Structures are given as structure tokens and as C-alpha cells.
Amino acid sequence: MLIGAHVSPAGGPAKAVERGTQRAARSVQIFNQNPRAWKPTEYGEAAVEAYHEALAGSGIDALLIHAVYLLNAASEDPEIRAKTLTSLIASLRAGDLLGAQAVVLHPGSALKGDVGAAIARAGEVITEALAESDACPLHLENTAGSGGTLGRSFDELAALLEAAGGHERLGVCLDSCHLYASGFDIRTAEGLTATLDEHDRMCGAERLGSLHLNDSKVALGSNVDRHALVGKGELGEDGCAVFLSEPRFDGLPCVLETLSDPKNPGPEDVRACEALRERGLAARG
Ligand SMILES: [Zn+2]
Ligand SMILES: [Zn+2]
């Protein structure tokens, strides 16, 4: 498992590698544009070159690009739809340039409208974005299920994959906090096994491509997305140890999005997760 962290790309993607290294990360995740503005970043040749040079000399083996939360591929509003498409294409093209393992996308929101129609709209936008980019995979992230957000269940994720034509570049990103908040009790190895069996049955085992490890501040099935520090929430250290030691997650990037000291990057968070992984492996025997 490539345990890593969400880091700032301020100063360019090579800087993100530097910040990941300070955190002893094996994978990093960045936003490729300001999360509060509709302004896709275009990486120039020098920035891309500096990134690849930094990466080659680092212990980081995977980059994830998280599409920003403004996007709603399921929107009925033509302007939001167009902006979402432009931004998603830019993210995937950035992923192509940087050799990212994937772009991670929250599939969208039906808001108060019909879920089936929203899934169909999201599928169209995703299909168009894939057609306008070369090779970077796109991972649809499971959501906590607040409001009309799509992707709260494996049914919905499977329907989204299908609506996007089951494209070979599509995958799934599983977030531990979102799973728990949407009602999957993943605190034990048995619970996580049952959850992943359902994922594999509905979405296909081969689709699982990346992970977010966040603890949850809120109760099982509460459908609210409130991250807690690893080990400090409802999953607790034991629940996080289960997630970190899951055999089906071997080799996947697992990004911590909630960090103990976001301003002063140090190796503590990743090291603590490595220790929890060992603990989880020992408990599995
Ligand atoms: Zn996310
Ligand atoms: Zn979240």
C-alpha cells in the first residue's frame, strides 16, 4: 500500500513532491486548480519537467489529482455543466502530462431532482471528458450520501460506471469516512470484507484503484461528510488498522486527507499509519 497525503501544489507540482517527501509519503494527491474558482491550471513545459525530475528522485510512486468540489457532472444547469466539462478535461490532461495514477472525481449531485436522470447526465459529461483526453484514468469516489450526492452506494457507483459506457479508463476511489457515513460498518475485518465483496460484485474488483483514509466525526449511516484525524474518530485506531491492512488494498495509493499539522509537513501522520498497518496485519494473523 502506498500510504500518502493530500498536499498543496502551490509553486507547481514539483513542490507537491517536495511536500510529500517531507511527509514520508509514498503517494500524493493535489487539487490541480484553486478549489474555490473555476479556473483550470495549465502546466507549462518547465513545470512538467521539474515535476518529473523531482518525482524520479523521490520515494513517491503515485500521484492522484482530485477534481475540485465545484464540479457537478450531473448538473441540469448548462453553464455549470459546461464549466464542469472544461475543468474535468483540464484535470485529465494534467493527469496525462504528469503521469498521474488517476483523477479522482465526486460523481456529482442530483440536488433535489431525479437520481436516475442525474446519473445519465453525469455519464455523458464523463464520457465526453474521457474522449477529450488521452490516457489518465478517472476514479469515481464514493460519497457520504449527503443531500443528492451520487455515489453513496455500490448500486449508484455501478450505475455511474455504466452510464459512462463502462469505459476502460474508469475506476473507483473508496474513502473510508464516506463508506462509514453512508452506512458501511467497516470497523472490523469482517465488515470491510463484506463491503468489498459488494463492491467487487457490483463494480468489478478490477475497478478499485485508489483510497482515501479519513476517520469519521459522525456516526455510522449519518450521511454527513465530516473527516476526523486517523484514529481519532468513530473508526478509531482499530478501524483504521483494519482499512490499512486490507489485502485487496495492497499496492494502491491510500491518501490521508486529514493531517495533524497541515501547515508544517512532517512524517508523523504517515508513520503512524504504517504502524497501524502493521498492527492490522498482526491482528489478521
Ligand atoms: Zn474526495
Ligand atoms: Zn470527505
Image: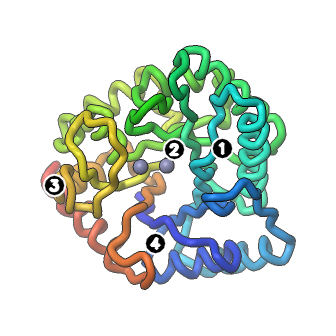
Of labels 1 and 4, earlier in sequence is 4
Mark 2 lies within 8 Å of ligand 1 (Cβ measured): no
Question: How far is disc 2 from disc 4 in space, using C-alphas?
Answer: 18 Å
- Return the residue at label 4: 25
Residue 97 marker: none
Q: Secondary structure at mark 2?
A: strand
- Return the residue at label 1: 137
Question: How far is disc 3 from disc 2 in space, using C-alphas?
Answer: 23 Å
Q: How many marks?
A: 4
> Amino acid type of disc 2?
Gly
Residue 238 marker: 3
Of labels 4 and 3, earlier in sequence is 4
- Return the residue at label 2: 209
Q: Estimate the x, y position of residue 137 in percent, counting from the top left.
A: 66, 44
Q: Residues within 10 Å of mark 1 (few under 14, many from 20)?
A: many
Question: How far is disc 1 from disc 4 in space, using C-alphas?
Answer: 21 Å
Of labels 3 and 2, earlier in sequence is 2
Q: Residue at x 76, y 62 (%)?
A: 41
Of labels 2 and 1, earlier in sequence is 1
- Marks 3/2 in contact by CB < 8 Å: the verdict is no
